[in-house]
Amino acid sequence: MITVTEALDHLFALVAPTDPETVPLARASGRVLAAPVTAARAQPPFDASAMDGYAIAGPEPNRGATYTIVGSSAAGAGFFGELRPGEAVRIFTGAPVPPGASHILIQEDAEVDGTAQRFAPDNDRTGQYISRKGSDFPAGFQLTAPRRLRPTDVALLASMNAPEVQVAQKPVVAIIATGNELVQPGEPPGDDQIFTSNTFALAAMVDAAGGDARVLPIARDDLKSLEQAFALAQGADLIVTIGGASVGDHDLVADAAEAHGMERAFYRILMRPGKPLMAGRMGRSMMLGLPGNPVSSIVCGHVFMLPVLAALQGLPPAPAPRETATLGVKLPQNGPREHYMRAKRTPDGIVPFDRQDSSLLTLMSEADVLMVRPPKAPPAQTGAPVDILPL
């Protein structure tokens, strides 16, 4: 068996990132930027007032200094005459600072009588209150790639005058649940059948991570049905199978995949839940075979599928990001496999559930983190640091 890190290295070696495409900025949030964007001009593109008040020329004003108001500057309607000492221009937040202006007297510190304005602060506060040209970013500033674009990144790109951007194409992920025991929700089950659930969790994870999930019909435990499923999956960037990746008499996924040209890499992973994992390439598609057990499948989706999906979008290959938290209970020594324990955040720290049965979706639904214990980790005391994967 190999470690989780070794398995991820094998998977990343199989990744072929998707090609870029150009999309309108309004559709770019959540996508991975594929090419850097360069600002053609500075932001702000002029010295701008940071406050409502009066722009003046000359040295820092003294209390009681008076000025003649000669104009007004508003956002989108600036005053561009030359401002001379002893003159003031009424100015509003975001408006261009007139040429020659040195300070903004905020309106709370001004007494106005007709066209005259006097500096009369409540205290001795002073300041220029001017946002200088390029103080946010200069002309030539670049937003680098690759990066997953957040709403704040989209706002920055808009201020850089980027109406459209190059992003990685959404990886198409074909999801195939396998097994004679499965039926779709809403279908009448036989006495020996259950409803497929992993499919829906994995599809939701794919869509939330920037992919395009396509759920295919359930494949039965025979080579013909599996081969038909793989034929339907052709053209996908990633094919994810659920179940049939072990070595039992009914685990036929590997044989069917090989019939479609996959060079199989079959791994047994030193982790729990989830031990069997299958991976390879099938034509232009990458294939990832996950365990059929519901919780094992979802955990492996977080540990393996999501990092692969990020790499397919051009992000640097990396494990799922972990956080460090405080353990809320004592724990005994761990066994020989890395354990991803379903757990909850509490005021006392991270508390794993007493039951870790990998078939219990109720506990998986209640968990908000996976607490990771290394192989053969010694007993842990309350308050000890632990690694977690947020769910």
Image (cartoon, rainbow, N blue to C red):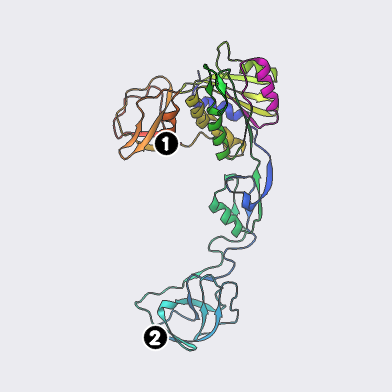
Residue 268 against residue 203 in the figure, above or below = above
Specify the segment rendered in magenta: 217-242
Residue located at (44% from left, 79% from top)? 60
Circle 1 crowding by C-alpha within 10 Å: few under 14, some 14–19, many from 20? some
**Which element type, helix, strand or loop, lies under badge 2?**
loop
Q: Position of residue 114 (x, y in %)?
A: 48, 89
Write down the quadrant of residue 202 in the picture.
Answer: top right
Residue type at numbered disc 1:
Asp
- The image shows residue 157 at horizontal and vertical percentages of 60, 55
The image position of residue 356, as x and y in percent, is 40, 24
Q: Which of 18 and 45 is in front in this view?
A: 18
Q: Which amino acid does label 2 sit on?
A: Gly
As for residue 69 lying within the magenta part, the answer is no
In this figure, which residue is indicated by the disc labeled 2?
Answer: 64
User: Please, is residue 21 above or below residue 186 in the view?
Assistant: below
Q: Quadrant of residue 260?
A: top right
Which residue corresponds to mark 1?
A: 368
Determine if residue 291 is in view.
no
